[in-house]
Amino acid sequence: METHKTIYLKDLNVASLLGKDQEANISKDLPMRKWLFSWLLDPHIPGNMQKSVDKWLGILIVANLFTLLFEHVPAVFEPHKAWFHWFDIFSVAVFTVEYLMRLYLAPEDPEFNKKKFARLGFVSSPFAIIDFLAVAPFYLQAFLPIDLRVLRALRLLRILKLFRIVVPAYNDFQVLNEGRTFRQKVHALVFPSKFGGELQKIFDIFIGIWVLLSVMAVILESVESIHYILNLQFVILDGVAVGIFSLEYFLRLYASVEEPGHKGAFMGRFKQAKSPATFIDFIAILPFFLEVFLHHLLDLRFLRVFRLSRLLKLTRNSDATDVLFRVIAREWPIMSAAAFIMGLLLVLTASLGYLLEHDAQPEKFENIPQSIYWAVITLASVGYGDISPVTPLGRAMTSVLALLGIGIFAIPAALLASAFSDELIKDREALKANLFQILKDGKIVESEAHYIRQEAERMHLTVEELNALIDTVMKEKEIEDNLQALPIHTIAKRPEHAVEYFKTAISELRQLGMQMTPGEFEEAAKTADRLTASEMALWQQIQGKS
Amino acid sequence: MTPTDAVNEPVKTGMNGYDMAFVGLMTLLMVIVFWMTTMNYQEGMKTEVAKRNGEAWAQWLTTAGTTRFDEGFSHAPCSGKAEPGTWGECVAYIKSQTELKSLVNTFFDKPPELIAACNKEDLSTTGGIVFDNLVATPPGSAIPVIVKPLTADDLITAKLQLRITVCDKGGYPIKISEFEF
């Protein structure tokens, strides 16, 4: 839940601001039981081990689900029976320790400590009953002959333990979305927003797990021996994955009208549908439906490989793909010029190769289209060697072209690398400019702290890097404050002050450009000839556009 | 209604008609996906039955292969000493006299055909069983074995190295096993 606290600059601790001050503030003088509860189970103490405990238990529960599934595959289960058995013992041991620990610590838990018999309250609570059911069948089978199938069915109850993680997240979600409509709630669940909370993160993790599972299944399906054994399991897994991804796809479409810039029941959703991320979602489910409906008309087995595109769904949670597209769009004119030269060189090389080598090797340089393969392999410096020139002229030309190829093919790579670096600098400059504004009043309110956290995470800034950035901004601000108090003629007396004043003025002009919509300034300047050509050139230069 | 009333009007947070229609559509979608998965599963089951058929043939022939050159081998047409001792006679005997006669190709609900090769252009081969004779080449050859379909006229009076394959629903081959007969 959002806390509305204000941080004053004199108390600013960047590690704490970023939530990376992991050391929990738990006194060693606490009684043993209280101390243990604070470290292991208290969800309200930042930096304790409660989240880690929940995470590892969650992983163990999911692993249990998978072992249960594979136990039904004799070809997998029979040769590894002992491993399955020991894993079950390990899981039961961990779950038993967890249950006993929660029972022991129940009197410290605010949920039970108000009851007369706190431990009895814990034992009769729904979560504790689920925890008990997760381990009880294992112990019962020692005393009672239980059918293996019943035992396995009871072990399936372990999955319910995940409720311990999901239910609190759901409750928080309900609180965050109080008074909001059904569609807004759906939006909060599937799109990142301040209303999503932990439940939105769990949803993303859930989708991510299914993406990885289904991609692994596609890869393993291509292994004949595995496909032979797990054919039906792959069918079920694909069906479940498509069910989940279809649901996600339509939930996103339905709730997309709540996204900024997606107004209109049809146009908003259409805009969402044609966005790259949603298109990927669509491609991820399409092969399943096409294959089921059209398999009797066409052999659509090749479509199965498109299921691998599900991996692209994971890029939704990463900013890197956006940056890549932005960089390509920005550098497109130069990249397209480089691509044009590459294409030209390719056709010329292939034509010359055909001209010089056709007579000597008619089977390898049969025509120009066939020679293009050789030209690409040569220009890209791959050089498989399956086709190579044999005539002296052909070899001489190849030597020159191979050298040219190194330069020409390196251009787009160098362009991209430099554009990436520029983009990073631009992002940091933008953050710096915003930090300047944020720190102006000497305090950081929660919404500003949220923005800093979000940007630091997006740009992968470490505590040290953000600290350095804030230090720079504060120093610049200090100088600016000092200089602004002085009249121009006083600043002019000290060259170093004049330089700082000039830097501040440029920085402010840059900020002005960043705050405006691209082209807006230029248009306003042009309409009434407000700026001279040299003034406009200077503006462009300051904005880094010339 | 005064502006104050409008502000104080409770926000409708329940599901409206559109929301219900959406939930209905989602439920329908899930039903369709479930139905399609069930269909795929049933088709997969048919492939599994075809694989079990192939395995049953492989099992029977492997077992027979260990004793068919012995005196008193009970399945005479498949004996190594049978006259004239052709694959066709052996197959006819197996299909009519042994437990393999009850096998069913569930794609067509009839006994599985023994065919020359799977063919994705000809879906009548679906669920069919293919026997290939693996003939070893002389030592030093580039290819260690030559694979040729076992025909009805091929003699079985010598030990044979066989490969059994079944055809899946798209007419693609699924290798079952290689064994000595």
Image (tube, rainbow, N blue to C red):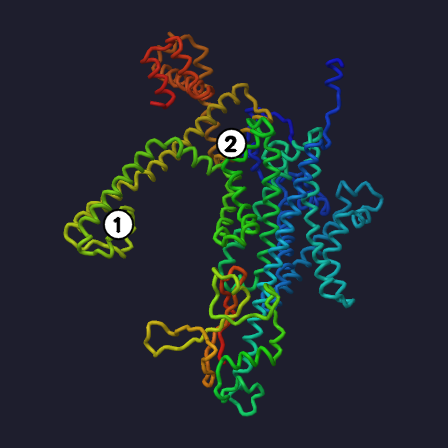
Name the residue at the right extreme: A116
The reply to whether residue A80 is visible in this rendering is: no
Image side of residue A412 versus residue B131, left or right: left
Q: Quadrant where the C terminus of chain A lies?
A: top left
Mark with earlier residue (2, 1): 1
What's the mark number on residue A455? Answer: 2
Say which amino acid is labelled 2.
Answer: Glu
Name the residue at the left extreme: A392
Q: Which residue is mark 1?
A: A371
Give the percent coordinates (x, y) of residue A448: 56, 26
Image side of residue A53 versus residue A377, left or right: right
Q: Which chain does the numbered disc 2 sit on?
A: A
Secondary structure, mark 2, is helix
Give the percent coordinates (x, y) of residue A16: 57, 33
When the figure is inspected, residue A27 is found, relative to residue A426, above or below; the finding is below
Which quarter of the figure has residue B5?
top right
In depth, the one of B33 and A317 nearer the eye is B33
Spatial CA distance of label 2 from label 1 is 50 Å
